Image (cartoon, grey):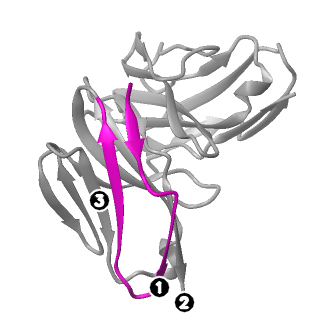
Amino acid sequence: EAQVTQNPRYLITVTGKKLTVTCSQNMNHEYMSWYRQDPGLGLRQIYYSMNVEVTDKGDVPEGYKVSRKEKRNFPLILESPSPNQTSLYFCASSIQGSEQFFGPGTRLTVL
Amino acid sequence: GQNIDQPTEMTATEGAIVQINCTYQTSGFNGLFWYQQHAGEAPTFLSYNVLDGLEEKGRFSSFLSRSKGYSYLLLKELQMKDSASYLCAVTLGNGQNFVFGPGTRLSVLP
């Protein structure tokens, strides 16, 4: 089944404790993105990648890192999480000029 | 900066037609997507407009006017399952920089 998977689905952590949210797709898509979704603000793009080893900042990259060492994986790294990074996070993948397929979401709470 | 506007909430009756508008002021416009998102779930793709005009797909149609910075999503023969948020998104530059609007929450009443 073609899909985008994210892990973990739910995470509660404390300020300053490094964490990684994994994202994997099995559709051989070149493009992958990370978003955060907050009430009243909609989806905001954090980072995107157009291929292996090619990443670029979206609208809200501060406090986040990404890497794209393999085509199928695009992990999101929070080196020192803070409470304002409490949010619902979505990973997505696509081919050029086509729709994005979203993962199921990761609900992160930073205390 | 980039700005995308949508109405916050709309209500319509089962079987009716509803039009959800989206206006945008962005630089480097590439195309416009519409997504549907049910509460607690991931967004799913509805339509994509690159050129001016109407794209029809079953009960859903989407219109784009690039010169006016305007799009709408038209939903016909509304069903209860259409109660969801509808997200308008513009792609910029290389086509992978997405800017989403705040979303419109549609409630379909019996």
User: Do marks 3 and 2 share a subunit?
Assistant: yes
Q: Is residue A75 above or below residue B44?
A: above
For mark 1, what is the residue? Answer: B13
Name the dominant secondary structure of the magenta segment.
strand
> How many callouts does the rendering have?
3
Image quarter hosting the N terminus of chain B: top left
Q: Which of marks 2 and 1 precedes in the sequence?
A: 1
Tell me the distance, in whole angstroms, between the alpha carbons under discs 3 and 2: 24 Å
Q: Please, what secondary structure does the residue beneath circle 1 have?
A: strand
- Residue B33 in the magenta stretch? The answer is no
Disc 3 target residue: B72
Residue located beneath label 2 in the image:
B110
Cα separation, mark 1 vs mark 2, equals 6 Å
Where is residue B32 shown, x and y percent of the image? Answer: 28, 44
Residue B54: in sight, yes or no?
Answer: yes
Numbered tag placed on residue A46 in the rendering: none
Marks 2 and 1: in contact by CB < 8 Å? yes
